[in-house]
């Protein structure tokens, strides 16, 4: 790398992998971390004063929708990875529900060329499980893995066929690539929000928690049968987390992720409530009843589910935090009814402040929060990322844990600011993001 050397001076350097938590300087040069320690000296470098700031490994998001190819009206590689850098993420994994789907080597190759041209951060592609994501015929897992796929998913839909799931999990055992599953019974998903008291009061069709839990149970059984590697995406129910907990105790090879919105928002947000759950933070302005920006899949569940998911993240049942960044153009969210609105919310620029709220709420230490966003998701990647090690790639995030800011569409980097957080005050903002030693975001 030929980027200008940097000296990040006087920040609190936190690296869970290497057990580091101390005020220090970090010297970056030729794309690598050169030195970490107090009072470093170097010539010909650009300095950044990190006094009062946190210096951490670059954040990693294993569940992002960049919408390319085919849906560039929602997001592009350029805008999505710029949003990632603004949120402190230096690596993202992109989901395959694109048009065409990421189901063939040629499509992965074309995507790779676009990433090379446009991406501001590292992008690792996740290939489909079935051709065209249609659920009828398995892809060539080995060829796609050789072409750079770091995992396989039909995200957006569940792979209906248990036989295909068995074949995918068998392949995962040999390839050491996770099968990353969207768990939702196709025959129970015809709703717009969580099925419960709030949906009944609003008169909206609901998606029961059982829709998710049934498929989690099936896929865990198939994982145990095959010895494969299952990764459960966006776990949203406490009972689903408990199924994973029991499977881990039995020795099943399963990892799982939680999303900040499922930890801090519940189904009352659909009805306009703007209080973050499980923390003592200022509430946002009440939204209009039935807000399409709260329509996400899996849906926002109950307050009890948020508490159980927090407990599962604390005890290691859920391994990491991801965002499920799902941008949609305004016209797709500003629908006449909830039925017509698209599922999904933007997440890359909000994960850090939302997780910092949980730190202030006493649920995690700052060290543990950083681990959940760095070293833990790095387990899914083929590079030694998520750590601040001398000689390692200089992927670094510098953030102010206390900076207050108001979420406004015009301040966001993503192309589609579809989020129910609009108008809310958050704490925690990224100041500097390095990828391979080069600055990709500077506030």
Image (cartoon, grey):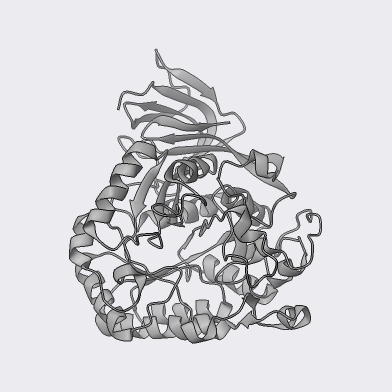
Residue, x 64% and y 43% (percent of image)? 428
What is the tally of numbered marks visible in this picture? 0
The quadrant of the picture occupied by the C terminus is top right
Left or right, residue 411 beside residue 64: right
Instruction: In the rendered view, tell whether residue 100 sits above or below residue 78.
Output: below
Residue 383 appears in the picture as rendered:
no
Q: Which of the pair 15/295 is nearer the observer?
A: 295
In the picture shown, does residue 434 fall above or below 238?
above
From the viewer's side, name the closer residue of 207 and 114: 114
Q: Is residue 187 visible?
A: yes
- Return the x and y of residue 126 as percentages of the image width and height: 34, 59
Q: Residue at x 33, y 30 (%)?
A: 31
Seen at 35% across and 43% down, the residue is 115
In this picture, is 243 found above or below 29?
A: below
Q: Nearer the viewer, residue 271 or 379?
A: 271
Residue positioned most to the top? 43
Q: Quadrant of residue 229?
A: bottom left
């Amino acid at each position: 790398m030929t980027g200008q050397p940097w000296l990040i001076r006087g920040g609190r350097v936190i690296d869970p992998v290497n057990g580091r938590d101390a005020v220090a300087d970090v010297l970056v040069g030729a794309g690598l971390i050169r030195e970490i320690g107090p009072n470093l000296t170097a010539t010909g470098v650009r300095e950044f004063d990190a006094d009062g700031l946190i210096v951490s490994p670059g954040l990693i998001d294993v569940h992002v929708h960049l919408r390319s190819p085919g849906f560039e009206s929602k997001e592009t590689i350029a805008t999505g990875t710029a949003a990632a850098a603004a949120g402190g993420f230096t690596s993202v994994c992109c989901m395959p529900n694109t048009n065409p789907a990421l189901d063939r080597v040629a499509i992965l190759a074309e995507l790779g060329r676009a990433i090379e041209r446009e991406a501001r951060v590292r992008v690792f592609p996740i290939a489909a499980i079935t051709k065209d994501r249609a659920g009828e015929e398995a892809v060539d897992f080995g060829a796609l893995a050789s072409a750079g796929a770091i995992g396989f998913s039909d995200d957006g839909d569940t792979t209906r066929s248990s036989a295909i799931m068995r074949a995918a999990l068998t392949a995962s055992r040999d390839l050491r690539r996770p099968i990353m599953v969207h768990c939702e019974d196709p025959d129970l998903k015809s709703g717009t929000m969580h099925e419960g008291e709030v949906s009944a009061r609003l008169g909206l069709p609901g998606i029961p928690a059982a829709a998710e839990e049934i498929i989690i149970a099936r896929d865990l059984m198939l994982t145990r049968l095959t010895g494969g590697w299952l990764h459960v995406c966006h776990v949203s129910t406490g009972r689903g987390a408990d199924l994973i907990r029991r499977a881990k105790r039995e020795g099943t090879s399963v990892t799982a992720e939680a999303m900040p919105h499922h930890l801090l928002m519940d189904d009352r947000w659909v009805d306009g409530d703007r209080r973050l759950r499980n923390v003592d933070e200022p509430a946002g302005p009440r939204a209009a009843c039935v807000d399409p920006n709260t329509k996400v899949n899996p849906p926002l569940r109950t307050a009890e589910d948020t508490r159980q998911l927090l407990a599962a993240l604390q005890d290691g049942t859920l391994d990491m935090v991801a965002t499920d960044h799902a941008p949609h153009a305004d016209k797709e969210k500003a629908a006449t009814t909830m039925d017509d609105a698209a599922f999904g919310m933007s997440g890359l620029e909000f994960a850090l402040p939302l997780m910092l709220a949980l730190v202030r709420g006493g649920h995690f230490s700052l060290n543990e929060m950083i681990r959940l966003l760095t070293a833990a998701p790095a387990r899914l990647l083929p590079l030694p990322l998520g750590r601040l090690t001398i000689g390692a790639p200089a992927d670094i995030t510098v953030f102010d844990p206390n900076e207050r800011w108001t979420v406004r569409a015009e301040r966001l980097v993503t192309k589609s600011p579809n989020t129910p957080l609009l108008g809310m005050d958050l704490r925690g903002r990224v100041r500097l993001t390095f990828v391979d030693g080069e600055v990709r975001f500077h506030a």
